[in-house]
Amino acid sequence: MHANRFDDALAAYAKSIACDRTYIESWYNKGNTHRRLEQYQEAIDAYDALLEINPEYIDAWYNKGCVLAIIGEHERSIAAFEEALALNPALPGAWCNIHKSKKELDRIADAMTAGDNALSIDPSTVLAWKNKAGIFLELEDSENAHSCLEQVVTHTTNRQTGSTSTPGICSKLKKPKQTFARFRKKHA
């Protein structure tokens, strides 16, 4: 049933683009629909078409960076996020995604700097704290990982639960029960 709705949406975007190839919202929505369908090259193509029309469309750069990261094109992903940041340097999510791509490229110091950049924009960016905790754990630095997870607990809100990986990270700490118990208490 969902596939039919996506097919209908893609057909509508194609009609809109056929009428006006410069209507960027159709390109953007087409890219997002292909992304949801995990048709990543088609998503990239749609974002690229939009960016040819309007190279200052921040969300297209951002979403293109996300898709490139998904398919393992981390250098290109970083470049797309950097384009978004050149247009709006106050995007902690872009820095978090750069962090992930640089980590995948084994550029740990650069990844940590990207996480710090996200936190300098918004110290309550839970994903940045979780990303940093993950690296500290890989470096077997439980103390700093624990400190980062304390920040996750402190900054997590009802709409941003942090529950995706926080319990898993907590289990790798020297004091997993205390950290996870505090996390659970905050979200009970």
Image: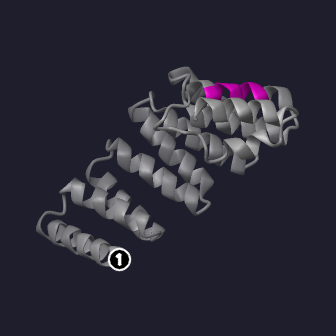
Give the percent coordinates (x, y) of residue 57.
32, 44
Q: Describe residue 37's horizontal placement relative to residue 126 as left or right.
A: left
147 magenta-colored? yes
106 magenta-colored? no
Q: Residues within 10 Å of mark 1 (few under 14, many from 20)?
A: few
Q: Which residues are magenta?
A: 146-153
Amino acid on which disc 1 is placed = Ala
The secondary structure that most of the magenta stretch takes on is helix
Viewport quadrant of the N terminus: bottom left
Give the percent coordinates (x, y) of residue 172.
83, 42
Residue that carries the numbered disc 1 in the rendered image: 3
- Decide which of 78, 40 is in the foreground and name it: 40
Q: How many marks?
A: 1
Give the percent coordinates (x, y) of residue 155.
56, 26
Give the percent coordinates (x, y) of residue 68.
53, 58
Residue drawn at the location 45% of the way across and 71% of the way down: 39
Residue drawn at the location 35% of the way across and 64% of the way down: 33
Q: Residue furthest left?
A: 19
Viewport quadrant of the C terminus: top right
| Residue 107, visible in the rendered structure | no
- Decide which of 184, 176 is in the foreground and name it: 184
